[in-house]
Image (cartoon, rainbow, N blue to C red):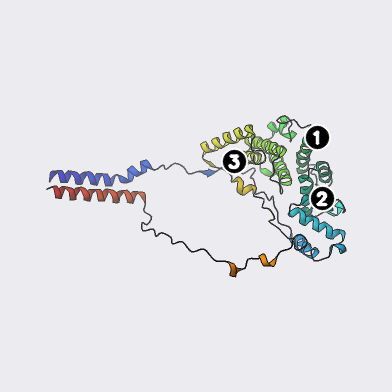
Amino acid sequence: MKNLIKYLLCAVVILMNSDSLIGQVIDYSKPPSQENTYLFKVLKYHRQPAPPKYMKSRIAEVNTIPTSKWTAQDSLFYAYENVHLEEFEMALSIFSRVNIDTIQEPHAQMLYRTTLQSLERYEMLKKFNEKNIPDDPTSVYSIKQAVLDLNNAYIAYKRKTYIPDSTLIFPILENAALEKMNPKKSPNKNKLVEIAFAIDSAFRHFTVLHDEKDYVLSQAFEEMGDFQRDYFYLTNALFYYAGSRHYYVTDKLVIEKYNKVAKEMSEYNYISISFKNKFGKIINNRYRMNTELNESIDSNNLVTPADYTAPPKKKGQKDYLPWIDNSILIMIILGLALVFVLFFMKTKK
């Protein structure tokens, strides 16, 4: 009987302390949090923008007109369609026969820029950018300056005058005046924010419909990553280093920088930006608008709902054990163990 009382007392003590034991096992450390990127926040990239409504309607209209009756404007909209379909050679052959000065709408200008960049017509691209991107003389570093700096890097790379790991794409980032700028000023008065915004905007010009290997763009993203690491936020730096790796995955120096920043963020328990969600994905023929001009569809090959047989549904296995809190589960197990001990002792007697 005395032994039975001892067993009961031990079991009660164990049950009473089960919550404290669980608390020691479970890590109640501070949950991961997002770094406060108040001064400069990376916004989502739209690298495959949808055609505006006016453009989509006009393209549909053009596709109903015989090509022999097309006007110059009709041909221009056919070129826009081909850019969306990533048929850049065809698009440029049309652009070269029309008056480019008539391209004024921002989306249309973006399509022409993308065509020139994709076909490495960097000199033509520079002239178009110089003429059409508005400048801001009051800014310490404008979007136009950043775009032209990146444009010039492409020209130098094509001419083989670009020196890898030595040529700085954005020379302003080496300016000693940066250290004298106040990084804590509000965003609308912060010169460092102006520089970051200009460079990020330049990236948005050069990443549209572009996923191919690109050493120059990789270096540009690396420079922005360094700038963010030194003057802004680890979260942003990791994003731009990821962009650098996206365009040139084998750069060991960038990999080292990426891993170092990732480790620092882990130490601060920061949540990283989802590069996949922020940078987006380019899908082939996402905005296919062409009809019989580009392809003919054999109706005999079309699959109708009547031809489709759904696969048999799999019977899901019923979950007989509902969700139970860990502490309750442990107490139940200990209780069953106690009952087993008592039953064993009774049987023994």
Q: Nearer the viewer, mark 3 or mark 1?
A: 1
Q: Nearer the viewer, mark 2 or mark 3?
A: 2
Image coordinates for residue 186, horizontal then vertical, percent: 66, 42
* Quadrant of residue 231 within the rendered picture: top right
Disc 3 residue type (three-letter): Thr
Other residues around mark 1 within 10 Å, as few (<14) / some (14–19) / many (≥20) = few
With respect to residue 80, does 16 lie above or below? above
Query: Which of the two residues, 186 or 45, is positioned nearer the viewer here?
Result: 45
- Tag shown at residue 159: 1
N-terminal of the two: label 2 or label 3?
Answer: 2
Q: Which residue corresponds to mark 2?
A: 92
In the picture provided, is 218 more to the left or to the right than 327?
Answer: right
N-terminal of the two: label 3 or label 1?
Answer: 1
Other residues around mark 3 within 10 Å, as few (<14) / some (14–19) / many (≥20) = many
* Quadrant of residue 243 within the rendered picture: top right
Disc 2 residue type (three-letter): Leu
Q: Secondary structure at mark 2?
A: helix
Image coordinates for residue 1, horizontal then vertical, percent: 12, 46
Disc 1 residue type (three-letter): Arg
Q: Which residue corresponds to mark 3?
A: 235
